[in-house]
Image (cartoon, rainbow, N blue to C red):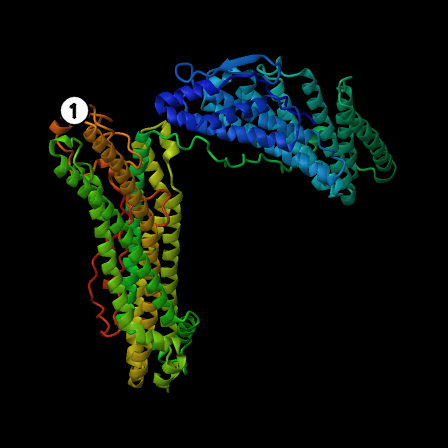
Amino acid sequence: MLSIEKKRTDKIDIVKPLTKYIKEQFSKSEADAHETAIQTLNSMREDIRNLQDKTETSKDMLWKYYSILSSLEIRFPIGESNVRISFPWTDSYRQRKTSLYSIYFERSCILFNYGSIISQIGASQSRSNVEGIKKACNSFQCAAGVFNSLREYISMHPECFASPDFSSESLGMIVALMIAQAQECIYEKAAMDNLSESIQSKLAAQVAENYETVDQLLNSATLKTLVDRNWSSTILIKVFLFKSIASYKHAKGLETISAFGEQVARLNSATDSINSAKANIQRFTPTELRDTVEKYLVTIIKYRDFAKKDNDTIYHDMVPPEHKLTPIEKKSIAKSIPLPEISFVDPFNNLVPYSVKEDAAYYNDQKEALLKKEVGNIDFNNQSAKASLLSMGLPGSIEALEVGIPKALQEKMDIVSSEHGVSNITSLLENLQLMSEEDSAICLAAGSILKKEEDEDNEMRNKYQASWHRTPSYTLTANLNQDLAKYQMHLQHSTKSDGFIRKKFEDNKQLIGELEHQDQVISLLPSNMLPSSKIPEIASLTVLLNDLDSLMATREQIAEKLKDLSKKDDITLKLIAPTRDKSVIYAEEIKKYEPLQISLNESFLKQQQIIENIRRENEKFTNSKSSQGGEREEILQRYANAFKIYQELKSNLDEGIQFYANFQEILVKFRTRCEDFANEREKERIELVRQISAGVNPYSPAPYTPSPNSSSGGYSPYGEAHQSPVMQQHHQPPPLGPPQSFRPPPYIHGAPQQPMMPPPHQYQYHHQVQMNQPPPPYQQSFAAPPPSFSVPPQIGKMPPQYKPK
C-alpha cells in the first residue's frame, strides 16, 4: 500500500509577533495573561516539526495543534502587512520549500500532515488478519476525508496553491488513491471471509476502476513530472491485477449456471490482464505486490486450462469474443470519512474586541426577545386550551362516569401523596422566604456601606471645611445608588409575587391536603350509576383530549429545544473576522430558529381545530348523559383543578428559588463593589487627615479617587486618575444616570455564564383558577400575545405571522 510523505518545516518564532499584537490591540496585561498560552503554542509547533513516528499519539498532537490554529485564524490577522509570521513548508513530492505569511497556509500544511500520518498508519498495518484489514481500511477512508476537507479549505484560500502538492489535481489524486486502497482492503476482507464469487468479483471490479482513476490523474500534465514514477508503475500493476481477479472470480461463479463458454472467455480475459500486470513489474515493485501477481498468475492459468479442456471435450459451449462480454457489475463500498469535530479549550478565548462583544450582545438581545415571545405564545395557548376545557367541564364530566375512583384522579392522588404535597409546598415556601431574606440582607448591607461612607465624608467636610478638598461622596456613588435602587425595586416586586403564591397556596391548601389523604376524597365522592361504556360519545372525546394533551406536551418539548438552542447559540467567533456584512450574518443565524417556530405555528392552528371538535363532541355528550352525575362531576373537576394548582405552585416556587439564587450572585458582587469603593475612600480619608494634620498644602495633587464602577478603581469620575483640588472643585459632578455600558444585560433563562440581572420572578396568577370561584365561561377573554413568529426587522426577513382563523 502507498502512503503520503509528510511536509517538513523550519523552526520559527511565533511568540514575539503574537505578544506584540495583543499589547497593541488589547493591553499589556492581556499579553502577560496569554504569555503561557503563546509559549505553549510555540513549543507545540516545535514538537510537531520534529515528529518522526507514525502513531496515534503523533496524529493526536497534529489534530490538537490544528484545532488551536483555528483560534489564531479568526483572532490574529497574520499576513505580510500585519502580524508578520512567515511559515516555511516543503511540498511532499520533491521537498521544495514555500514560505507564506499566511495562517491559512500553516493550517493547510498541518492538515496535510495529519492526513499523511493517517495514511502511513494505514499502510503499516499487517493485513494478514481481519483486524489488520479493518484498521487499514478505516485509516485510508479517514485519510480520504482529511484530504477532501483540505481541498475544500484551500479552494477558499488560493494563496496556498503556491505549494505544488496543494493543487486541485494533486489533492484529487490523493483522495482517489486513499479510496482505492480502502476498497482493496474491503475486497481482501471479503476474500478472507469466503464471501460468494459474485460479491468478490464486484468488489474487485470496483478496485480496478478506482485505480484506473488514480492512474489517469497521475499521468495528467500537472502530476506526471511531479510524482514518483514508481507510483505510476505500482498503480498500473494493480489496475491489471484487479481486472484479472474480477474476471477470475466472475468465471468461477459461472460454473454454477453451466455457462461454460462464457467461463472460458472470462478466464481468457483474466489471463490477459494478469499477464499485463506481470509485464509492468519493475525491480522496485514491492515484494508483496510481486508475490500476489505471481500467485494469481499461476492460479488463473491453471483454472483456465482446466475449464478450456472441459469445454472442448465435454460441453462444447460457444466461447464468445471478449468485446461481447457484458461488463462485470461493480460494488463500491469505500467512502471518505469526515473530519472529527474540533473540540478544544481555546487559550485565546478572552481576546474578543469590545466592538465584537457589543455586536454579539445585539444578536443575543434579538435572540432572547424571540425566545421570550415564543415561550409567551406557548403559555398563552396552553392556558387558553385549559380554560376552554374548564368551561366545558372537561375532563371532570368524563371522569365522573368511571365506576369507582377514576384512573386519572387516582394518578393525581398518588403523585401528591408520594410527594407529601402540603409539606412539600410548605418547605419550598420556607426556602423561598429564606433566600428572599438573604438577598434583602445583602442589599441592605450594601446600602449601609454606602450610607456610612457618605456620612463619614460629610462629617469630615463639616469638621475641616475648605481644607477637605476631595470629591463629595454623592457625586461618586450616583451609579451605585441607582443600581441599589434598582435592585431594591426588583426585590419588592419579587416579594409581592411571593405573597401572591402564598395566598394561592392558602386558598387551596385544604383540597391539596385531601388529595394527599386519599380516604377523604373517596368519602366525598358519590358513586356512579352509569358507566362510561354506555355512552358512545365518550370514546371520541377521550381521543380528542389525548390529542390535545399530546399537542401541549410537544409544545413544551419545542420550548426546551428553543431554550437549549438559545443557550448554545454564540456567534461571537463569526463576528470577530466577518467575511460578510453583520446584518447578513444576523439574518442567517436567526434562521436556525425558524423550523421550531414553524412547528409552534402549526401547533397553535391545530389546537383551534381540536378545541372546536371537542366542543361539538361535548355538546353531543352533554345532551346524552344523565343529569344524576352532576355532584360527582363537580367534585372531580374541583380535585382536577386542585392538582393543576399544585403543579403550578411547584413550578412557580422552583422559578422563584432559582431567581433568588441567581440574583444573590449579582448582589454579592454589588456589595463587594461597594466595599471596595468604601475601603479605597477610607484609605484616602486617612491620608487626607494626615496631610491636614501635618500642614501639607491642600492644593497639592489629590490622592487617588476610586471609581464606583470598578472593584479596584482605575480612573477618576472626571477621566483622570489624579486631579488637583482646585480642578476638582470647579468640575461639574457627573450625570446621575449610569453610563450606557453599565446597563445590566437582560435576563437569560438558566444559569448565566456571567452575572446578569434577572427580572423578578412573576407567576401567571391571572391565568390560574381559584378553587373558591366558579369556572370562567368559555368566552373569557385573554390578553393576546404578540404576533407569533416575528423577528425584529434588524435581523433580516421576518417569518410569517401566526394568524388564528
For the point 26% across and 57% down, which residue is it? 762
Q: Quadrant of residue 710?
A: top left
Quarter containing the N terminus: top right
Name the image quarter holding residue 298. Answer: top right
Given residues 785 and 529, the one toward you in this image is 785
Position of residue 534 relative to residue 81, above or below, is below
Q: Percent position (x, y) of residue 712? A: 31, 34
Residue 152 x/y as whole percent = 49, 27
With 85 as the anchor, is 617 left or right in this view? left
How many badges with numbers are in the image?
1
Residue 664 pos. (x, y %): 32, 50
Query: Is residue 328 in view?
Result: no
Q: Amino acid at mark 1?
A: Tyr
The C terminus is located in which quarter?
A: bottom left
Q: Residue at x 18, y 27 (%)?
A: 695
Q: Is residue 586 visible?
A: yes
Q: Secondary structure at mark 1?
A: loop
Q: Nearer the viewer, residue 803 or 398?
A: 398
* Residue for point 20% across, 67% down: 779
Q: Is residue 526 left or right of residue 156?
A: left
Mark 1: give few (<14), some (14-19) or many (20+) Cα within 10 Å: few
Residue 366 spot, x, y in % from top left: 28, 42
The correct choice, above or below, for 694 with respect to 747 in the image is above
